[in-house]
Image (spheres, rainbow, N blue to C red):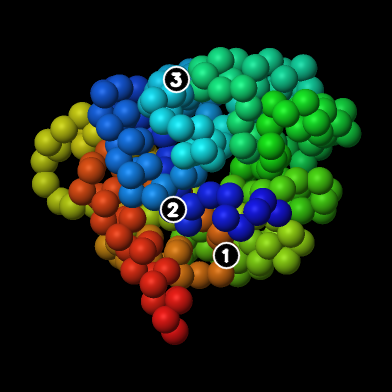
Amino acid sequence: MIEADAFSRLGFGVTGPHAGLGASRKATSRLIHQAVDLGVTLFDTGPAYGNGEAEQRLGTALKQLPRNKAFVATKAGIHSGGRRDFSAGAVEMSLRDSLKRLQRDHVDLLLLHGPAPDEMTDKLIRRLQAFTERGMIRHIGVCGRGDELDRAIELGVFDALMAPVNDSLSEDERQRLTRARANGLSVIGIETMAGTARPAGAPRSRSDLWYLARQIRRRLRGDATASAGMPAAAGLAWSLSQPFADSVICLTTRSAHLTANAELVGALEAGATTS
């Protein structure tokens, strides 16, 4: 498990609209700096997001800040154009390219991005451990949704899991996250607002258009979570109040939303302290 105070309860996702036309580079940089000002230290990104654009934006923004202000998580295994390659050599090349884009000499957490259980080979794990010994990464983990997470827990060599944490989790998924934490793995929650309501109305910005396009794609795929459920703030509050995750990642393009999310975390933490 990663040290309890290594990163903030709320993380910021540099992906989605921050990996392309959904937000300008200046807007992404402003939000990253605002997140730091609000006490956010965990930043999640990956080389597959915008073919490296998201990592490039995060690296540029963080270069202007002290190194101790950020815990950076990135990924490997899914490459440009969605190409999968979890071979030890490909993961090493991916990591080296990520470090260049992030303008850092190490990443705090390298996550295998949705590997099949049999893709987590002994050779790959030895290479990941070698990266750790050389200081290129501090911690290793797995990002996924299914039996790859079970395999990661079983192997006992990973420090963290990144997985969906929202109120539509099945009982099996909840038990998996509980088991991961019991086995000493940190859990970082994603998709915490999946299925929550977005404000109605016509798109007013590039990011609104990005979210609308994503919703249409999900509906065309028959994704049941595409339609609105509980308010977004309630979805985030649920994810934060449950015992499944050490931190949760938020994805937003609006300053007011980021502030509201940080205030919600602060209120929940204050309540836990006084109770």
Q: Marks 2 and 3, Cα distance to the nearest angstrom?
A: 22 Å
Q: Residue at x 48, y 56 (%)?
A: 9
Instruction: Looking at the image, tell me whether mark 2 or mark 3 is earlier in sequence order.
Output: 2
Q: In the drawing, what numbered circle is on residue 209?
A: none
Horizontal side of residue 60 vs 176, given as left or right: left
Disc 2 + disc 3, Cβ < 8 Å? no
Mark 2, residue position = 10
Identify residue type, mark 2: Leu
Judged from the image, the secondary structure of the residue bearing numbered disc 1 is: loop
Residue in the image at 64% along x and 61% along y: 177
For marks 3 and 1, give the one nearer the viewer.
Answer: 3
Q: Is residue 169 toward the left or the right of residue 152 in the image?
A: left
Q: Which residue is mark 3?
A: 56
Which of the 4 image quadrants contains residue 265?
A: bottom left
User: Disc 1 marks which residue?
Assistant: 244
**Front residue of this view, candidates 190 and 270:** 270
Q: Quadrant of the N terminus?
A: bottom right
